[in-house]
Amino acid sequence: MTEGPTGRRERKKAATRQAIADAALQLFLERGYDQVSIRDIAEAADVSTTTLFKHFTGKEALVFDQDQDRESDLIAAVRDRAAGQSILDALRQHVLSTWLPISTHPQRAQFTDLVDSTPALRGYAERMWTRHTDSLSTAIADELGVEHDDLSCAALARFVLEIPALTRSRRDRQAAVEAIFDILTHGWKPPGSPRTTGG
């Protein structure tokens, strides 16, 4: 069975997008974010600036090229979870399986230095996950059969989406992610406080 025109077109589009993102990251790491222009990136990727802007909204988006699918993946983690799996466990699994591999990538140290040393990228990174709060909150509310403006659903969505920023600098990121989800699951206890049992 031969691949249709739409399939070929989408594959070519994805390859072009990846080539642009790879060229941008390489230039940013070599020269520094502020020393690289959109034109530099387009030339390195052998595309026009018009083509570049068809795939990316700006320089920040070029650094975080995997952000495009994050919202749909988050919603799918909630809506398509296994039978009997809680929403929190589904989100825990999603964060561990999607964010941790990024955080252990061989270029992660260089990438983190680039982001941390560039105010525009640092701000974008902090907003990147949390801007999906409304859509994730809505998905959680739908699963629970409550109103979309339910505060507990919005709070849970926001807390989950803060996890990458909260755990980014931790030595053992997996343990940190697990610890935060344990707090969300069992409630917060002051550090060092004895566990109490209901009577």
Image (tube, rainbow, N blue to C red):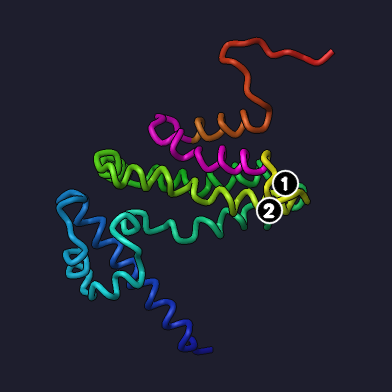
Is the residue 183 above or below the residue 76 in the image?
Answer: above
Give residue 174's position: percent from left, percent from top: 49, 35
Q: Is disc 2 placed on a helix, strand or loop? A: loop
**Span colored in magenta:** 153-173
Could you give the CA–CA distance between mark 1 and mark 2, rounded to whole angstroms?
A: 6 Å
* For the residues bearing labels 1 and 2, Cβ distance under 8 angstroms: yes
- Checking the image for residue 137, the label placed there is none
Is the residue 115 above or below the residue 188 in the image?
Answer: below
Residue type at the position of mark 1: Gln
Give residue 101's position: percent from left, percent from top: 44, 47
154 left or right of 100 in image: right
Q: Quadrant of residue 172?
A: top left
- Which residue in the protein does label 2 denote? 81
- Which residue in the protein does label 1 denote? 85
Q: Magenta span has 157?
A: yes
Q: Residue sitting at 31 percent across and 59 percent down?
A: 62
Is the residue 151 above or below the residue 6 in the image?
Answer: above
Give residue 86's position: percent from left, percent from top: 72, 44
**From this viewpoint, which residue is outermost toward the right?**
199
Residue type at the position of mark 2: Arg
Give residue 15's position: percent from left, percent from top: 35, 72
- The image quadrant where one finds the C terminus is top right
Q: Is disc 1 placed on a helix, strand or loop? A: loop
Q: Nearer the viewer, residue 139 or 86?
A: 139
